[in-house]
Image: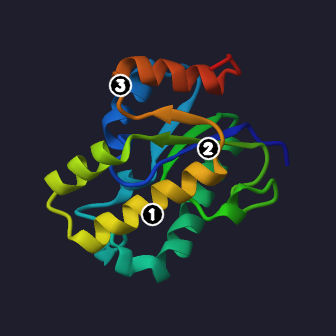
Amino acid sequence: MNREPLWILAGAPGAGKTTLLPHLVRQATGLVVMDMDELLEDGALVGVPIAEPEAAPVWPAYDRMWRRIVDMVRRAGHPVLLLTPVPDPEDLTSDARWGDPTRWALLDCPDTVRLDRLTARNWPQDWIDEAMEDAAQARAFIPTIFDGGEDPSTLAERVLGWTRGETL
């Protein structure tokens, strides 16, 4: 089945995905923009905690649900930009769970900025440590990187330019 393209903008906690989302939605034309956190209510989906490190065993099922949602939108003829947490390296292969064609980029920020953002959320230190590790790992295997500290409106235009194939 032919599918419209999927662009995935991954980011560890504190990268700026939630701040960027409304700018992407407002500035996108012909592109469906979604964030994997949009279905969560207080970090849970139908009462099941998802957005906590302890919920890691549930994450594959949550990813499969999002794959179905994205597939329905693409099947209807709409390209998708999906904001996600940092994937495992094997998810970046062309036959990974998201299907083809899929393009990956990373929303990142300096570690000092991430630390300040997560501390302001009153996150426990072990969650912060895991977010810092996720960010370091992502930098090693996602070559296209956007700076989450940039002005959100300008950043949204650069990300949308990436989806249009414009030079970064």
User: Residue type at mark 1?
Assistant: Glu
Q: Give the camera-side residue of 152 and 21.
A: 152
Residue 111 position in % (x across, y down): 36, 48
State the CA–CA distance, disc 2 to disc 1: 32 Å
User: Residue type at mark 2?
Assistant: Val
Badge 2 element:
helix
Residue under label 2: 73
- Mark whose residue sits in front, 3 or 1: 1
User: Residue type at mark 3?
Assistant: Pro
**Is residue 51 at least partly visible in the picture?**
no
In this image, 97 relative to 124: left or right?
right
Badge 1 element:
helix
Residue 124 position in % (x across, y down): 20, 70
Residue 79 position in % (x across, y down): 65, 34
Residue under label 1: 133
Badge 3 element:
helix
Is the residue marked by circle 1 packed among few (<14), some (14-19), or many (20+) residues within 10 Å? Answer: few
